[in-house]
Amino acid sequence: MISYARQTTEEQPATAPPPVEDHIAPAPRVSVQAFCETVETAAAVQSAGEDRRLGKAHLKIQMGGMAAAAEAYRSAPTPNVIVLEADARSNILTELDQLATVCDPGTRVVVIGRVNDVALYRELVRRGVSDYLIAPVNTLDVVRSICNLFSAPEAKSVGRIVAVVGAKGGVGASTIAHNVAWAIARDLAMDSVVADLDLAFGTAGLDYNQDPPQGIADAVFSPDRIDTAFIDRLLSKCTDHLSLLAAPATLERVYDFGADAFDAIFDTLRASMPCIVLDVPHQWSGWTKRALIGADDILIVAAPDLANLRNTKNIFDLLKTSRPNDRPPLYCLNQVGVPKRPEINAGEFAKAIESKPIASIPFDPQMFGAAANNGQMIAEISANHRTTEMFLQMAQRLTGRSETKKPKASLLSPLTPLLEKLKGG
């Protein structure tokens, strides 16, 4: 019996293609070694190693397949994950048995083969193989397989990070971030947290009418203390489903950080919160760039003028290049229709960026000003306002939810219509 640690999802026939996951949680700091037979598989694994979700993994690729792996580990410890490509002419089970004699307990094994057979799949699972992929594989196949080894199947929705950033200062990105987070929590019923990353001038506390004594600064300046319990103590509860990791909004300190300063905070939030909305300040530094590239979904907020168009395109292009295996970032136009101000319309924006805005939010200083001064969301001021519906639609796009949480008709009891009539009576 192979001594690999068994971690596999529910058994499914090898003839059925695996479902495409909308969200792939990143892998932790693990060592991965791949032994490939073909240059095509080696290229796919190399590309996977460059994906943001494997950014913390240490990946090494060698040629020679399963025979080379067995030889390599006769005199060296095995890593956290081994990716093995089986040659079409090889006997996979025999070679796995040989590898088992030199494999350390706890190592997880992913096999890439060309035999599409349910009996083989079941035998591999029985022997403790974590996953079996049918060649040829692409980059996302490898990313998904490795990352899923460290994600519990029941926690697939946990850890989605949405980053919101302004293309230019003063375009209302924070306001939109806070209102979208409100819609995610209230209308989509997802437990969410807003992390205000503008430590000196953040407005999330004002917008949610919160004044917590602690917040994100306590975490970023105490990296050795960061764990789930510590972060929970720093959260300020805004609603049943929405919490806030507030910025201090004070100038006693200078907030200069290294590129990885927020990594531990984000990792801890991912482990316990289904949705994290990052309110990213309009500045360009190592850590803001890292926060944007590492997010699952990104929203750029722009006003309809030339500087915003240029900046939006620059950010958009950089993120598409840095995240080749992800959905492209989204953007919206804000403060549209300022009286007497020349504007670049949505069509011109779409032509330049080669993507349409997901929303064009009208300029409404009275509504937005009242909400800001009262510490309320637009939905609280006017539930039927057209902007409230826009925020809900943006929340749905950013979280991959096509509709609000409602019971499915197939799950309703046959007695439901009768009960509803009795209640009405």
Image (cartoon, grey):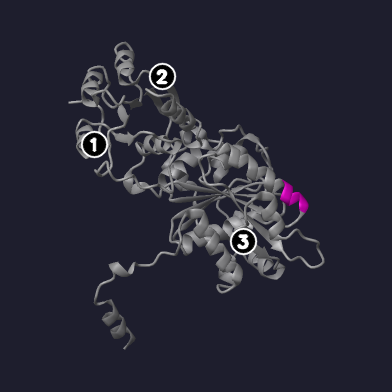
Q: Secondary structure at mark 2?
A: strand
SS at mark 3 in the image: loop
Q: Nearer the viewer, mark 2 or mark 3?
A: 2
Residue lying furthest left: 1
Residue at the limit of the structure toward the bottom, as seen here: 425
Residue to which mark 1 is pinned: 121
Amino acid beneath label 2:
Gln
N-terminal of the pair, mark 3 or mark 1, is 1
**Disc 1 crowd, CA 10 A, few/some/many (<14, 14-19, 20+):** many
Q: Which residue is mark 3?
A: 359
Q: Can the viewer see residue 302? A: no
Categorize mark 3 by other alpha carbons within 10 Å: few (<14), some (14-19), many (20+). Answer: some
Query: Residue shown at 33%/86% (left/top)?
Result: 424
Question: Where residue 414 sits: x, y (%)?
Answer: 24, 75
Q: Which residue type carries mark 1?
A: Tyr
SS of the residue at dot 1? helix
Q: Nearer the viewer, mark 3 or mark 1?
A: 1
Give the residue drawn at x 59%, y 58%.
358
For the stretch drawn in magenta, what is the main secondary structure? helix
Residue drawn at x 52%, y 60% is 182
Query: Does label 1 or label 2 sit earlier along the sequence?
Result: 2
Say which quadrant the N terminus sits in: top left
In the picture provided, is 384 more to the left or to the right than 27? right
Residues rendered magenta in the picture: 306-310
Residue flagged by tag 3: what amino acid is it?
Answer: Ala
x, y percent for residue 242: 48, 57
Residue 271 covered by magenta stretch: no
- In the picture of the structure, the residue carrying the numbered disc 2 is 62
